[in-house]
Image: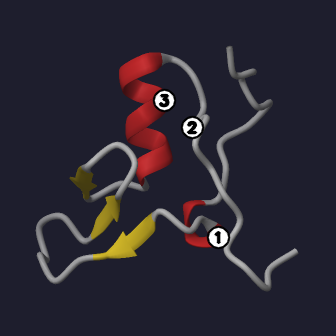
Amino acid sequence: MPTNPPRAPNCLQCTHFHVTWDPAFPRSCDVFDIKSRLMPSAEVYAATGLHCPSFELKPGLK
Protein backbone atom coordinates (compact mmCIF):
# COMPACT_ATOMS: atom_id res chain seq x y z
CA MET A 1 0.00 0.00 0.00
CA PRO A 2 1.53 3.36 -1.01
CA THR A 3 2.16 5.89 1.72
CA ASN A 4 0.54 9.31 1.62
CA PRO A 5 3.22 11.98 0.97
CA PRO A 6 3.19 14.88 3.47
CA ARG A 7 2.28 17.41 0.75
CA ALA A 8 1.11 17.53 -2.83
CA PRO A 9 3.86 16.92 -5.39
CA ASN A 10 4.72 19.53 -8.00
CA CYS A 11 3.01 18.26 -11.15
CA LEU A 12 5.29 20.39 -13.31
CA GLN A 13 8.16 18.11 -12.30
CA CYS A 14 6.28 14.84 -12.96
CA THR A 15 6.79 12.62 -16.01
CA HIS A 16 3.02 12.02 -16.22
CA PHE A 17 2.07 15.73 -16.44
CA HIS A 18 1.29 17.31 -19.82
CA VAL A 19 -0.01 20.63 -21.09
CA THR A 20 -2.98 20.23 -23.43
CA TRP A 21 -4.22 22.36 -26.31
CA ASP A 22 -7.65 22.68 -24.69
CA PRO A 23 -7.91 26.17 -23.13
CA ALA A 24 -10.74 25.00 -20.85
CA PHE A 25 -8.63 22.11 -19.47
CA PRO A 26 -4.95 23.01 -19.99
CA ARG A 27 -3.37 20.47 -17.61
CA SER A 28 -3.46 16.68 -17.78
CA CYS A 29 -2.18 13.56 -16.07
CA ASP A 30 -1.56 10.33 -17.98
CA VAL A 31 -1.82 8.09 -14.91
CA PHE A 32 -5.25 9.25 -13.79
CA ASP A 33 -6.40 10.12 -17.32
CA ILE A 34 -7.72 13.53 -16.29
CA LYS A 35 -7.68 17.01 -17.83
CA SER A 36 -8.29 19.99 -15.57
CA ARG A 37 -7.95 23.73 -15.03
CA LEU A 38 -6.22 22.93 -11.73
CA MET A 39 -3.07 20.93 -11.22
CA PRO A 40 -3.85 17.21 -11.45
CA SER A 41 -2.46 16.65 -7.94
CA ALA A 42 -5.13 19.03 -6.58
CA GLU A 43 -7.84 17.07 -8.41
CA VAL A 44 -6.52 13.77 -7.04
CA TYR A 45 -6.51 15.18 -3.51
CA ALA A 46 -10.05 16.54 -3.88
CA ALA A 47 -11.32 13.18 -5.13
CA THR A 48 -9.46 10.84 -2.78
CA GLY A 49 -8.23 12.85 0.20
CA LEU A 50 -4.72 11.58 -0.53
CA HIS A 51 -1.81 13.25 -2.27
CA CYS A 52 -0.80 11.80 -5.63
CA PRO A 53 0.84 8.39 -5.15
CA SER A 54 2.05 8.19 -8.78
CA PHE A 55 4.48 11.12 -8.87
CA GLU A 56 7.69 10.35 -10.79
CA LEU A 57 10.35 13.00 -11.10
CA LYS A 58 11.25 13.88 -14.69
CA PRO A 59 14.72 12.72 -15.72
CA GLY A 60 17.37 15.36 -15.16
CA LEU A 61 15.57 17.10 -12.29
CA LYS A 62 16.56 17.00 -8.64
- Mark 3 to mark 1 CA distance (whole Å): 17 Å
Q: Which residue is mark 3?
A: 45
Q: Which residue is mark 2?
A: 52
Q: Which residue is mark 1?
A: 13
Neighbourhood count class around disc 2 (C-alpha, 10 Å): few under 14, some 14–19, many 20 upward? many
Q: Are marks 3 and 2 in contact (CB under 8 Å)?
A: yes
Q: Amino acid at mark 1?
A: Gln
- On the image, the x and y values in percent for residue 28 come to 31, 62
- On the image, the x and y values in percent for residue 32 come to 34, 43
Which of discs 3 and 2 lies nearer the camera? The answer is: 2
N-terminal of the pair, mark 3 or mark 2, is 3
The quarter of the picture where residue 25 lies is bottom left
Q: Is residue 60 above or below residue 16?
A: below
Neighbourhood count class around disc 1 (C-alpha, 10 Å): few under 14, some 14–19, many 20 upward? some
Relative to 2, 34 lies left or right:
left
Q: Amino acid at mark 3?
A: Tyr
Question: For this rendering, which residue is in front, 43 or 1?
Answer: 1
How many labels sit on residues?
A: 3
Q: Amino acid at mark 2?
A: Cys
Q: Residue at x 79, y 85 (%)?
A: 60
